[in-house]
Image: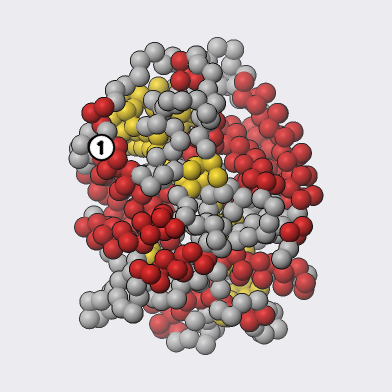
Amino acid sequence: MKTDFLVIGSGAAGLSFALDAAEHGHVTIVTKGRIDECNTDYAQGGICSVTYEPDTFEKHIEDTLVCGAGKCDREAVELVVRNAPDMIRQLIERGTRFDRTPDGRFELHREGGHSEFRILHHEDLTGAEIERALTESVRRHPNIDVLENHFAIDLLTQHHLGEFVTRHTRGLACFGAYVLDTATGEVVTVLSKFTVVATGGCGNIYSTTTNPAVATGDGIAMCHRAKAITRNMEFIQFHPTSLYNPGERPSFLITEAMRGYGAILRLSDGSEFMDKYHPMKSLAPRDVVARSIYREMKRRGEEFVYLDVTHKDAETTRRHFPNIYEKCLSTGIDITRDMIPVTPAAHYCCGGVEVDLNGQTSIKRLYALGETSCTGLHGANRLASNSLIEAVVYADRAAKHAISNLGSVDFQDGIPEWDFEGTQHAEEMLMLIQSKREVQQIMSNYVGIVRSNLSLKRAMRRLSIIFEETEELYGKTKPNRELCELRNMIAVAYLVIKQGRELKESVGCHYNTDYEA
């Protein structure tokens, strides 16, 4: 199969790129589930953009830099913030409906770490609304083919032409990917002029996460195996407030916009506690809030704290947060009368595959977008609702860059078909399930909100055993989604641990007790 642009992943970043690129060539989107089965669809809070005074670009830039704890790339921050209004207009043109006040102005939320109201939203289902609009546009476009239930196994580089490659190989380039049709077991060789990896995050390397089951770090792992550079992987952001509902997966997110609306974090006795940790109290940056909740739970021997919105007008609360209201009601909690039990959960990877200002990785003809990438915007801790706008800004930049170079590249000949020789169908599914749980337990127990040199060392030692067992199984087994996902989870967990061990300080989402300030 040949296509001008191969897009792996179907969230806001991948679909936005596809719509831009399809005006200049043929696009093939590969997604391992349904097209709308992605992290974007689960994003509740909203999308950032400077919209009205007294907000300014300078304020948004400063809020992002402060939240990123000195680890942001200022050039990337300015790029995203200053291009945000144009990208909001583009999303609206593509059918996204943001909530407005009766006089027609955008109804803006404020979230943790923000000095102004600048979060555009659609009720408490903003990501789902953006995904709906982009999906409908993609399905209508004659130049875009969508391969649902297809799993990208590995990226194609000079390695597949028999060359020995490293991260320092000059001219290292991507020529497409091996893609598994999960229905038939066939592996298709997809050749492309440009490849975009936009597979979302890696929350499922943890036992408790707000991410859907598809978020297993596939894109980061594929790029890592292809010898792309990754960075900031140690900065895994835990959302402070997921609904405490044991056994539910993914954990249901209680958006930060609720704290922006006025909800207060409380202990079981009703007392506030965030004033002990930060002057912004419940609206402090996420890493501070998550760590504060963790400390209070550990100190009191409890599994959750409470988020209290009962003091707000009931009808207004139901109107602003209809999805959260209905979800909590289904578990016996009326948020207009009852406090909501909440606990931190793995939520967002601030690092990823290193890219430049055009979204291009260290491998030529390969772009990484959205949560798969590390643009430098987030630094050590993501400012709430900056991720969706980053996704569409960099999708626009990457598309323009790829389109401008479309005439200078061609398809790579000589890539061999997938070699099934010596492999058989997997018969050890129970082992895969158990190994997956072990990875999640290792990461949750040793590489969570609070870490130490000893816990990271122990995590690496235990992960290495699972890695060896999985690679042995992979070498003799026909590829399937479950096995490939496990490989990817192990690779991403390795990067989180390795880069965590290399960072000799506590900053942002990476808090190591051996380097306490």
| Vertical arrangement, residue 157 with respect to residue 123, above or below | above
Residue at image coords 36%, 62%: 81
Residue tagged 1: 403
- Which corner quadrant of the image does residue 69 belong to? bottom right
Pinpoint residue 150: horizontal percent, then vertical percent: 42, 33
Q: Is residue 264 left or right of residue 94?
A: right
Q: Give the structural element (helix, strand or loop) at label 1.
A: helix
Image quarter where the C terminus lies is: bottom right
Residue at image coords 40%, 82%: 316
Residue 198 seen in the current view: no
| Vertical arrangement, residue 203 with respect to residue 88, above or below | above
Residue at image coords 52%, 28%: 168
Q: Is residue 171 left or right of residue 453?
A: left
Foreground pick, 27 / 319:
27
Foreground pick, 477 / 227:
227
Residue at image coords 39%, 40%: 360
